[in-house]
């Protein structure tokens, strides 16, 4: 038995290696060789540094302005990559200006190496105004449709390049194995095969053909097992045997490498007591050697510093930098103290603690990708050259994806679709909110300004009024989220008014779930639906009217206390800006719900 087990693991490793070798273009490699030979150590280290946009300037009103800070970073310290949004939502034209100013500054350097800019395009180009926003990945997974997911990648790439940003920090390939985890909705569900197939489809849509002015490079994340912390809390330890890692958490990343992914972002936490950012076995032995990955590895936000400040593994940040680079990190998402990073890494090389060969390998990988996407010849792309930006074709694609994602979980006595000319009560905290339809990573990190920036789209209530006729739709929220409070905070508005309104309708559409969140601010200890939402449902059941539960949530909130009396249950996940329209068409019977759960829905906490 022991021999069989060892053989099985060996075969799996060999299979990964055989299916995922990435090719290297000899023409590009010659260019990289030539450039590397001209670079000083300081110039090389700069290519391994990524800073947040705030390190280059500041927001004045709603406009981002540069000053001496940019020259200091890009010219004096040779920083090779920038990320992040200014804070206020920027138009594609404004992003063109921002990227142009950065690249013009890069042209003042000795070797004129362009800067690689990246953004979190999590469900479309969500940090650029007017772009097409798709369902979050958990909703896309519910379609089980690789072509829809591939097309979302095509559109994301097109609109990303229209804004001038050639690198997206997506897709998330973390398995949805822990329902407590605050980012479960950012991935493609719990099955490694489904996640791998959908991830590969998205990568092909975004990247192929690499070098086209309509394509980006992806960052597959968060390699690996980030989604399965023992505590359920973001950025905390996972304790998982390697055979389990290889069977469940590695395959989707192997599929991504096979699909040609050019960047990998690392798990922010620890696996079996070792910070992933200093785990050479995970980063080099498996990813680079076994899987044949020829792109570059980037850290997540400030994660080399976390090895020292959070994990207390090293005596100082300098030692943490050495451990991370030697483990296989090629670029550090610093994001602020780039001077310390660059100075420390140069010193580590001069002290013999990091080899020149390791530096050259890291920089080679970064430059290789910059050449592959033609960044040297085309450092900026402009909106004027992208006429399909935010057009009807893209809107239809987002709508279709939302429509195929929506999942019918229960339909007792054929309650749905809603009968023609029936009157409905729309109620619940998720009934009239674009924020809840989209979730986090929507215009802002936590999605808290989506009702402002997405006001032109239809909430569930607005879509139903347009679909069924305003005279047939009654609204009484009953419970509302505290939009300026914590994501879990809600309050009773007037449950009695909702109960009274139910007396005059044929259906009650109860829209419940969660407000928007992501990462550590979204941590929870309990999957139970809020007490206020339970109270609203309980009161509405007493009216005797058929109650349809509309679940609008990132995590599977347990509904065992209210499920038995529900006449029907529809799960919309986080369907994006066209989710309200898609749901209205399904409830009216114009579209048959075809989504399927990509995760196990727990009955109990």
Image (spheres, rainbow, N blue to C red):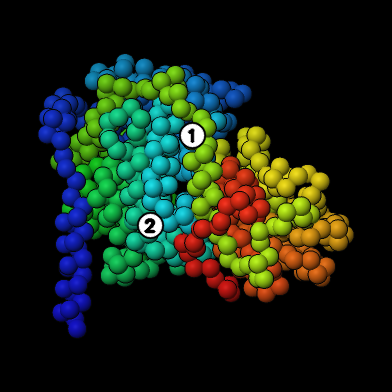
- Would you call the spot at circle 2 few (<14 residues within 10 Å), some (14-19), or many (20 or more)? many
User: In the displayed structure, does residue 253 sit left or right of residue 417?
Assistant: left
Q: Position of residue 173 (x, y in %)?
A: 38, 54
Total numbered badges shown on the rendered structure: 2
Q: Position of residue 387 (x, y in %)?
A: 45, 23
Residue at image position (47%, 55%) is 143
Q: Residue at x 69, y 69 (%)?
A: 566
Secondary structure type for disc 1: helix
Q: Residue furthest bottom?
A: 1
In the image, is 47 to the left or to the right of 56? left
Image quarter (top left, top right, bottom left or bottom right) of the C terminus: bottom right
Quarter of the image where the N terminus is located: bottom left
Q: Which residue is mark 2?
A: 195
Q: Looking at the picture, does residue 16 appear above or below residue 350? A: below
Residue nearest the observer in this picture, 357 or 65 = 65
Image disc number at residue 393: 1
Near-viewer residue (198 or 583):
583
Residue 407, picture quadrant:
bottom right
């Amino acid at each position: 038995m022991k021999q069989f087990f060892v053989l099985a693991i060996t075969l799996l490793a060999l299979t990964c290696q055989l299916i995922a070798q990435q090719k290297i273009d000899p023409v590009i490699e010659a260019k990289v060789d030539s450039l590397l030979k001209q670079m000083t150590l300081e110039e090389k280290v700069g290519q391994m540094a990524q800073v947040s946009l705030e390190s280059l300037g500041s927001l004045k009103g709603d406009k981002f302005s540069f000053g001496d800070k940019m020259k200091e970073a890009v010219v004096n310290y040779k920083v090779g990559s920038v990320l992040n949004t200014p804070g206020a939502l920027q138009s594609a034209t404004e992003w063109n200006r921002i990227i142009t100013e950065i690249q013009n500054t890069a042209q003042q350097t000795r070797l004129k190496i362009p800067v690689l800019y990246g953004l979190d395009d999590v469900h479309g180009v969500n940090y650029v105004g007017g772009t097409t926003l798709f369902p979050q990945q958990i909703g896309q997974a519910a379609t089980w449709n690789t072509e829809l997911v591939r097309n979302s990648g095509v559109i994301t790439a097109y609109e990303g390049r229209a804004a001038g940003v050639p690198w997206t920090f997506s897709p998330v390939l973390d398995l949805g194995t822990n329902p407590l985890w605050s980012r479960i909705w950012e991935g493609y569900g719990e099955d490694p095969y489904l996640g791998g197939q959908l991830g590969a489809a998205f990568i092909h849509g975004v990247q192929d053909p690499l070098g086209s002015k309509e394509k980006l490079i992806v960052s597959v994340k968060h390699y690996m097992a980030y989604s399965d912390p023992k505590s359920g809390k973001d950025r905390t330890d996972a304790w998982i045997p390697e055979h389990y890692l290889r069977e469940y958490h590695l395959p989707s990343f192997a599929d991504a490498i096979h699909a040609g992914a050019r960047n990998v972002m690392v798990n922010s936490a620890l696996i079996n007591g070792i910070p992933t950012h200093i785990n050479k076995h995970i980063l080099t032995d498996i990813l680079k050697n076994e899987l044949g990955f020829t792109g570059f590895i980037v850290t997540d936000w400030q994660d080399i510093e976390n090895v020292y400040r959070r994990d207390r593994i090293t005596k100082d940040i300098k030692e943490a930098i050495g451990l991370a680079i030697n483990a296989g990190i090629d670029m550090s998402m610093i994001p602020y103290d780039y001077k310390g990073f660059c100075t420390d890494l140069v010193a580590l090389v001069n002290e013999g603690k990091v080899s020149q060969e390791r530096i050259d390998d890291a920089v080679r990988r970064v430059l290789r990708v910059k050449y592959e996407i033609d960044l040297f010849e085309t450092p900026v792309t402009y909106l004027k050259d992208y006429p399909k930006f935010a057009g009807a074709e893209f809107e239809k694609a987002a709508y279709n994806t939302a429509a195929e994602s929506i999942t019918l979980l229960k339909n007792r006595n054929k309650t749905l679709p809603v009968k023609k000319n029936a009157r409905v009560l729309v109620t619940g905290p998720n009934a009239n909110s674009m924020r809840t339809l989209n979730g986090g990573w929507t215009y802002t990190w936590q999605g808290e300004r989506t009702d402002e920036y997405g006001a032109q789209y239809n909430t569930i209530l607005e879509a139903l009024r347009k679909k069924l006729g305003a005279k047939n739709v009654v609204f009484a929220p009953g419970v509302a989220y505290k939009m300026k409070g914590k994501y879990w905070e809600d309050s009773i508005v007037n449950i009695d008014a909702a109960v009274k309104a139910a007396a005059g309708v044929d259906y009650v559409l109860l829209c419940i779930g969660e407000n928007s969140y992501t990462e550590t601010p979204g941590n929870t200890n309990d999957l139970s639906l809020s007490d206020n939402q339970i109270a609203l449902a309980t009161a509405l059941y007493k009216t005797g009217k058929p109650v349809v539960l509309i679940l609008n949530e990132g995590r599977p909130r347990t509904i065992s206390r209210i499920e038995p009396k529900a006449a029907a249950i529809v799960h919309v996940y986080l369907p994006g800006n066209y989710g309200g329209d898609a749901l209205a068409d399904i409830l009216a019977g114009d579209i048959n719900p075809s989504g399927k759960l990509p995760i196990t829905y727990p009955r109990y906490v």
